[in-house]
Image (tube, rainbow, N blue to C red):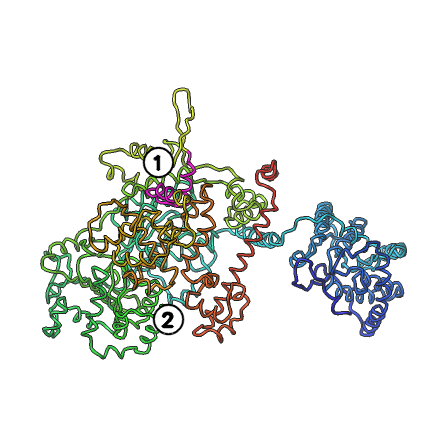
Amino acid sequence: MDEGGSRIRRRVSVCKRNRPSLASICAPTTRTELEPGEEEEDEEDVMAGSRRRKTVGLQAVEQNDSEEDMFGDYDSFAENSLLAQVDDLEQKFMQLPEHETHAADFATEDLCSENIKNKLSITTVSNCTEYKTDLHTKNQSEHEDVPLEPSDDLLYAVPSSQVLFFENLQNSSNDLGDRSIEEKDRNSFSYKTMNEELLGHIEEPQQSDEFSSKVRTSSDMNRRKSVKDHLKSAMTVNAKAQTPVFSKSKQLKEKLLSKEINVAKKAIESPSDDRGPFYSLPSKVRDLYVQLKGIEKLYEWQHTCLTLNSVQERKNLIYSLPTSGGKTLVAEILMLQELLCRRKDVLMILPYVAIVQEKLHMIGEGSRGAILEMTLAKILYTSKTTQIIGMSATLNNVEDLQEFLRAEYYTSQFRPVELKEYLKINDTIYEVDSKAESGMTFSRLLDYKYSDVLRKMDPDHLVALVTEVIPNYSCLVFCPSKKNCENVAEMLCKFLSKEYLKHRETEKCEVIKNLRNISSGNLCPVLKHTIPFGVAYHHSGLTSDERKLLEEAYSTGVLCLFTCTSTLAAGVNLPARRVILRAPYVAKEFLKRNQYKQMIGRAGRAGIDTVGESILILQEKDKQQVLELISRPLENCYSHLVEEFTKGIQSLFLSLIGLKVTSYLTTVKNYLSAKIKKSKAVCLHHTVKHVARSSYGQDNIYNMWPVHKIATNLDEIYHFMNGTFFGVQQKILLKDKSLWEVTVESLRYLTEKGLLGKDTVHKSEEKLQCNFHITKLGRASFKGTIDLAYCDILYRDLKKGLEGLVLESLLHLIYLTTPYDLVSQCDPDWMIYFRQFSQLSPAEQNVATLLGVSESFIGKKASGQAIRKKVDKDVVNRLYLSFVLYTLLKDTNIWSVSEKFNLPRGYIQNLLTGAASFSSCVLHFCEELEEFWVYRALLVELTKKLTYCVKAELIPLMEVTGVLEGRAKQLYNAGYKSLVHLANANPEVLIRTIDHLSRRQAKQIVSSAKMLLHEKAEALQEEVEELLRVPSDFPGTVGASLEKA
């Protein structure tokens, strides 16, 4: 057979796929074995049929009355076509004697399967099915009806003109299936194979003689009109049929949906949530904990907590234990139970840069607390099935939190490693003892020989305290400020023995090398000096990459000492044998009990240390305050909804009125449950979301189903507020006003600011009810998550920008996306400001002029002259930060910008991150206001630039997981310049081409690129489907479908 004719090519794609054999679609139940001689004879017949192909094929072409081949590359009428082979098969069979029926059956099946394997078209299958349907109708009582369905791959690759036949086939099969249910109970005969139905006169071995006679008679009649003619006629009609819209992406999604529904069926049939022996989890989870984390057995408190009735019944829970007690493991197991057993989604909220949620009492901490409180309050109000788990190391007024979260409470004082607390005054160390009258007892005197120089440089005896534990054990030294961290690290290294340089020397050299690699060859001079001794500082002045690298080195013991600020205690899980508090202060503020407990809680590493020690260094003047500190209870946590006015209660009210809560999830879950016909509940969240998005589009989901807002009038909002943490504590927090008055004032403020509008509704004849609705400005602020203190300023700045937006450079756009909340923290260096200003191009100077900042003003500030003209300080400071960002985007090097502006590189990175985030917020803000349409495309590109901060050609590569700037440059220089290049790369070739690239990293890069490419393709496909989809507001579409369901 000609190789070119053995496969078909799709018109819309260059990809070629092998078709499954017909036998794999509809296999016979029984099969007669052939004798060797018969097989050889059949092979000869096949060869003979092949020699006749050319003539038959030419006749087929002549009989076609169309001037062009309607089937294009399918070559349906040519000499190597399926029709020609069917005709050969028919001619050959007519010459076979009756006693060779079974042999012919086998030969025909082999030949037909071989041809159809590579040349199957839907027309052929449809025509065959027509014969099968006719025969089945006549012999309903003798044969079991098995509907014929195409395989997924076959359905995916068929020409669109054939889809109509598949739909008819499916409908026909379903109708036949309904009519033959009763017959199935009485009959057990197998259905005939496809090739038997194709030929129409090959009998099954198990059939009666009478039935065989009928088949032969039918065969004689059909000789007048060959099977080839039937097929040709059907293919011609089918090709002229109207082409339906047939989305391949939709087929794949429906296939996925089918799998998810099958999973849902199994979940429904399951009698409980128990999936295995490890706290209802599969034993594989337990094995992974042993393999990856070395956890073979849980602590007793962990077992008790996980087996609580409240946990088993999925009630809300708060649990509190000292730091390093093992809270995270319990949280992980609870999340895995939701994901694996109940198949529900999980959201974990992490404060700071924490890996573990150490402090639920962050509810009482500024704007972060207000945001968390609002989130939890809305979850509690709108969902009765969501379980909330809170964990904390430090809690006091837990009763208020319990009432707010409607939660059970579990606590334990368990610590895997004993913690001993000490105080150091001068040369004397005291142990904290709550039983002692003074609160402390004498422990020991420091025994360390100090020279006069060392005593002057180290009056707190830090060298003596740290050398008692390092380098074999680890140590943390908490310092009051960032600058003090660096000074202490350098001081310690000046007086450490040279022997410390030899401890894991090679690995420390590797750390320095890696720091240079991630910083484009730059290295902090302080770290260059301290790392060889195993010492480093840790604070927000480091870049995120530097912090990550240093934390890994500390965790593995390469570094043995960190000098750090208090943020490390609250966020990063880095325990130590000894924790030293340099002073009882954080900056200039005296320590709080919660902060103290967090810091000393880092002492003692489970599985490594047998004891943990904390030493607080204090002066005699602070002794009384420190004694009160260590003996007083933990501070209470309070709601910040009112204190954080614009980020708290006002933002909450705006979201209550503007946030749409839809019941479409419940509606579709009920619909699917009815379809599955099971009584037990099952979580079908992913299935529902998939159905809604694939069928109606993301933007139309909320237009489909009943939608309501959380609250729209004063009574509803007041009712909601009573259920918040603020509502629980209103008697404590509100002295002069009531909650009702605070609610009324906040709504009046939002209305006056133009964020809310009022509608008067006649609730009754005597009472007027005022309903609130969100305005366009309010919705833009809500969707953009803009701080309400700045939303009117942002609107004014964007409006003014339209009058003369400078597009010759990015400076004007960068100014508009510089975060307002960082402006107050800015303290410009006026000499640097003037130097940068004088280097601006005319277009860039025009931006400053439009903003009202002149060069003469900056010059006078730099020279210290008095200024009479009033200039907006916030605008001046914001422009200075814009200069920093603008320079960074041009240089794409944090280190060089840090030197130019004399700013910590960590601060610059935080500024860049904040600007990228705020740029995205401004984009969403503009999308809601038609007048700002011009900003939309501009801000999309600017957000990308701010997010990656690299040359434009590297941005596509930076989207890939595991690719940072340095790696992106390597890949680009090696010829991998796009996402497509990486997606098609060979990991082994990448390893040989790119320096310092491991096999795991190479595979991760390729996998991530493939996933991103697939997502982009899906997004484009969904966009196409959206264009072709019937509008959601089209009369009768959604309503009709729901009514039928």
Q: In this view, does 645 lie above or below 8?
A: above
Q: Position of residue 741 (x, y in %)?
A: 29, 32
Write down the quadrant of residue 420 in the picture.
bottom left
Residue 990's disc is: none
Residue 517's disc is: 2
Highlighted range, magenta? 773-797
Q: Can residue 1006 be seen in this view?
A: yes
In-front residue for pair 731/463: 463
Please report the residue visible at 77 percent of the width from the left and 61 percent of the height from the top.
Answer: 75
> Circle 2: is it few (<14), some (14-19), or many (20+) Cα within 10 Å?
some
Magenta stretch holds residue 86: no
Write down the quadrant of residue 735 in the picture.
top left
In-front residue for pair 698/29: 698
The answer to whether 211 appears left or right of 749 in the picture is right
Magenta stretch holds residue 789: yes
Q: Distance between the residues labelled 2 and 1?
A: 51 Å
Q: Position of residue 319 (x, y in %)?
A: 32, 52
Q: Position of residue 749 (x, y in %)?
A: 32, 35
The answer to whether 1011 appears left or right of 317 in the picture is right
Q: Element at badge 2? A: helix
- Look at the magenta stretch and give its main secondary structure: helix
Given the image, on which type of amino acid does mark 2 rest?
A: Asn
Q: Earlier in the sequence, mark 2 or mark 1?
A: 2
Given the image, on which type of amino acid does mark 1 rest?
A: Lys
Q: Element at badge 1? A: loop
In-front residue for pair 792/47: 792
Please report the residue visible at 42 percent of the width from the left and 65 percent of the height from the top.
Answer: 964
Write down the quadrant of residue 220 in the picture.
bottom right
Q: In this view, does 638 lie above or below 437?
A: above
* Quadrant assignment for the C terminus: top right
Q: Is residue 472 above or below residue 947?
A: below
